[in-house]
Image (cartoon, rainbow, N blue to C red):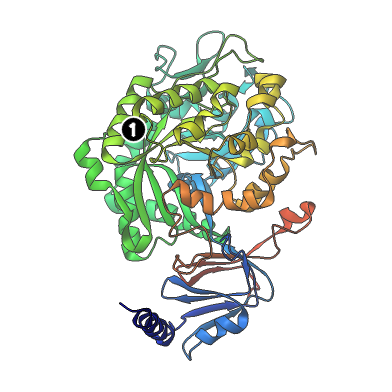
Amino acid sequence: MSVFVKHGFWVLLLTLISCSPQPEADLIIYNAGVITLDDARPTARAVAVSGDRIAAVGSDSLILTYRTAKTELIDAGGQTLIPGFIEGHAHFMGLGQALLTIDLRAAQSWPEIVALVDSAVQKSDPGTWIFGRGWHQEKWLRPPVPHVQGYPLHTSLSAVSPDNPVVLSHASGHGIMANQKAMALAGVNRETATPDGGVILRDASGQPTGIFLENAEALILQAYRRRQGELPADARRAMRLKMLRAATAHSLKNGITGFHDAGASFDDIDFFRQAARSGELKTRLWVMIAPNERLTPDKLKRYRMVGAENNMLTVRAIKQYADGALGSRGAWMLQPYSDRPGTSGQNTTPMDSILKVARLAYEADYQVCTHAIGDRGNREVLDIYEQVLRGDISRRWRIEHAQHLAVADIPRFADLGVIASVQTVHCTSDGLWVPARIGEERAREGAYVWQKLLKSGARLANGTDAPVERLSPLKNYYAAVTRRLSDGSVFFGDQKLTREEALKSLTLWNAYAAFEEKEKGSITAGKLADFTLLSANPLTVPEEKIPAIRVLMTVLGGSVEYKAPGQN
């Protein structure tokens, strides 16, 4: 073929491309400060959407050429448009339930909590289960009186709720306080054996205090589940739908368009799929199968789905638990706790069981996402991953929390291709008491070491662990870039994320951690049209003004699903 023929071919091809019809925009957002998080075009002024996809990104003048008589136009008023936030680790139905129960996070003493329960009892029928969540004994102004190991006794709680079973979840989710009625319904008494991987806290006479930690929680919660199982199917579905709607609305209000659900049952997954088909689900869910589900190759094959229901539901991960939480001294440590030398935490799931699940997941092409907070918990999980992956760094297996690491294990994340799925807000929420738990040296060397992980070549994901913490990406962002504690001090500031790193950790990096970086996480033509409009630019606003940034609008697949009050 001559050079002239070749030249003519390319001229014809370019002519055809230039003459191809420009897609008509269903939505145009213009006059915006667009942070794309796309290195090829970091900033822009406008975005055009066709269907549920981004059609073009560029200047106002360019993007407005996509306008037709049917195009919805949104003038952003110069505000900041970013990719929709992706929540990297939280509990969707747990969040919905927490939003419908007593919020104990602001309580500063045990008597205050008892008063809140007393008020709820007055509004409830006898026999109704009463739930609350968010208490943390380390954050109270003073220890309860009386107490065992810093935890209150159930007596004052039981006195105000004699006819209602009460369960109050610890902020960490790794412990509960149950009143006498709940313990009686569960058949728990002085003779009840402590389950493996759990703690029934007892007083000097051997009686349960009402505190059940880690695996011991199940003793009480099983009684509640039995009661729920006795309800009519319609009543159970109505309650679940109420929880889903609450979690969805709360997610959209916080600018969240994608949500990594850290543990859902097969029954929950079926419910999510039905909700997506009916249009009730308006948050894209990426789901880890809960650790207590019975797993078989056939069942994993049947439930594995990627981008199902118009990209609303993906199931391709399995959740496991290696240990508990630091607040309950359940995190599994290599050395004893500094403030309680008699314990090094707990292994909540036998490691040979996690190994078996990991092998099953590898064969079924699932990610494994294992909860590990203590340095020994992290080491044991890394050992299992290394054994199963055998040098395959493409699987994007995750350690959820990766909170306290031995120095020698930090580079292993990158070496094994393991993602550290962290919660930056845990650092600022818990940092005041962490050095007392594990000592100053261990805290400095291995607690919340985000920069050490990044510099070793590891990848991070970032979430809030809601309802453990508030579902607020902006609060999480502030924690990531400041590490500032409630007393104004900074928790080992050399480990802060830069502002760009922090924003990517809540968007693009979370998309990567779910194998979804080609669909989500940046404002790039061809990706899903998921956006969050903010009242200020998080990359440039003065640090002290970051907490004042508001979510003005949330767009999912080109549809405006949330507008802040007063927003046109």
**Residue 36 can be seen in this image:** yes
Q: Quadrant of the N terminus?
A: bottom left
Question: How far across and down, in percent of the image, does residue 62 sit?
Answer: 57, 82
Return the residue nearer the eye: 438 or 356.
Answer: 356
Return the residue nearer the eye: 411 or 475.
Answer: 411
SS under mark 1 = loop
In the picture, measured across the screen, residue 47 lies left or right of residue 489, that is left
**In the depicted structure, whether residue 32 falls above or below residue 179:** below
Q: Which residue is mark 1?
A: 292
Q: Count all numbered tags in the image, as a single digit.
A: 1
Return the residue nearer the eye: 360 or 175.
Answer: 360
Question: How far across and down, in percent of the image, does residue 458 sit?
Answer: 54, 38
**Residue 350 can be seen in this image:** no
Q: Residue furthest bottom?
A: 69
Question: How far across and down, in percent of the image, does residue 336 sit?
Answer: 59, 13
Q: Residue furthest left?
A: 298
**In the depicted structure, whether residue 314 falls above or below residue 383:** below
Q: Quadrant of residue 83?
A: bottom right
The amino acid at mark 1 is: Asn
Return the residue nearer the eye: 37 or 303.
Answer: 37
Residue drawn at the location 36% of the way across and 31% of the way down: 389
Question: How far across and down, in percent of the image, does residue 198 sit?
Answer: 45, 20
**In the depicted structure, whether residue 488 falls above or below residue 55:** above
Q: Residue furthest front?
A: 2
Residue drawn at the location 50% of the way across and 39% of the way down: 131
Residue drawn at the location 63% of the way across and 13% of the way down: 340
Q: Assess disc 1: are there few (<14), some (14-19) or many (≥20) residues with their C-alpha within 10 Å of its C-alpha.
A: few
Q: Quadrant of the C terminus?
A: bottom right
